[in-house]
Amino acid sequence: MREIKSKVQFNNEVARDTYLMGLKVEDEEFLAEPGQFVMLRLSQATDPLLRRPFSICGTTRKNTILILYRVVGRGTFLMAAMLPGAELSILGPLGKGFRLPDPGQRTFLVAGGIGVAPLLFLASRITKHSPRLLIGYRSQNEIIDISGFDLGGVEIVLATEDGSTGYHGVVTDLLASELNRLGGAPSVVCTCGPPAMMQKVSEICLKQGIPCQVSLEAAMACGVGACLGCAVRNASATDGSYYHVCKDGPVFDAMMIEWESL
Ligand SMILES: Cc1cc2nc3c(=O)[nH]c(=O)nc-3n(C[C@H](O)[C@H](O)[C@H](O)COP(=O)(O)OP(=O)(O)OC[C@H]3O[C@@H](n4cnc5c(N)ncnc54)[C@H](O)[C@@H]3O)c2cc1C
Ligand code: FES
């Protein structure tokens, strides 16, 4: 992990309030694993003071880091206004990423909305496994344009809660029906999205004895294990001990997390 200088190469709107940013790293090679994240300094001034965490959504051969983000507050508002050529300081890559599935395992990647970001990186690394990427949205007007990603070999299935496109219902029901259809074939699931969605995915997997990895989010001040601000409760410890999402994660085995504490 180190501080790296980058320049915005592009910053394109890919859905309402959602952008794909390409950050070109000059002078040095940027190597990252799916599931790792970066901390971005979004202002040269003091507002916002703290860096913001973002999953690495991909890397290109031309040493460009892809960030898929949704505008939710001051930092991401500033980010959305950045033009090509703007300089941005990156801290990373940070954290522990996904364990890559074995080639023989049927792999389901289950995303809730913007949670698709780290799963796109993972999907691009395991295209030979023919993973199924299930993405859930509330409605079709939220669908993120991912046509710019090289995902040949990845089967993408959409679910919308209002039924406006794809499977009619929540993405966790779509996962359950796909797993039932497979009838117990060896599978593995990786997921990222709202905590309630990931908890449901982990319950479905637990019932069927399917390994499940979850990519968690938490408020982060430092991103490197120093401030202890990103704690989540460890499910197996009786002494109430904690993991730190930035250092021990953000990717965890679903069984490691005490979901009720999130
Ligand atoms: C490991 C990790 C990876 C992440 N990857 C991505 C990513 O790939 N794409 C992306 O868009 N976001 C991602 N996030 C979330 C992102 O860090 C926040 O959206 C961002 O920090 C918000 O900054 P802000 O200054 O715009 O908003 P703030 O001013 O900090 O917050 C504005 C409002 O948004 C809420 N908010 C802040 N963070 C989140 C959040 N994580 N989820 C929901 N609401 C939030 C706040 O409670 C507040 O109400 C990730 C977070 C973590 C911890
Ligand atoms: S963000 Fe500081 S310890 Fe995790």
Image (cartoon, grey):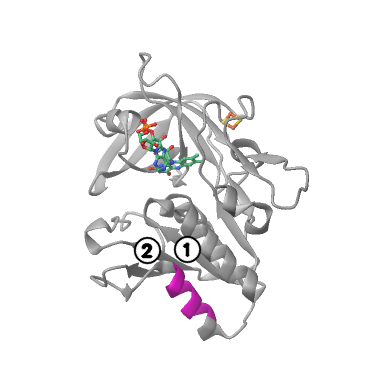
Q: Position of residue 42 (x, y in %)?
A: 37, 25
The residue tagged 1 is 110
Amino acid type, label 2? Gly
Q: Residue at x 43, y 74 (%)?
A: 174
Give the camera-side residue of 5 and 29: 5
Secondary structure, magenta segment, majority class: helix
Residue at mark 2 to residue at mark 1: CA–CA distance:
8 Å
Tell me if residue 70 is in the magenta stretch: no
Give the camera-side residue of 22 and 166: 166
79 vs 179, left or right, is left
- Part of the protein shown in magenta: 172-179
Amino acid type, label 1? Val
Rate crowding at label 2 as few (under 14), some (14 to 19) or many (20 or more) other CA atoms within 10 Å.
many
Q: Residue furthest right?
A: 238
Query: Which disc is residue 243 wearing?
Result: none
Tell me if residue 174 is in the magenta stretch: yes
Looking at the rendered structure, the secondary structure element under dot 1 is: strand
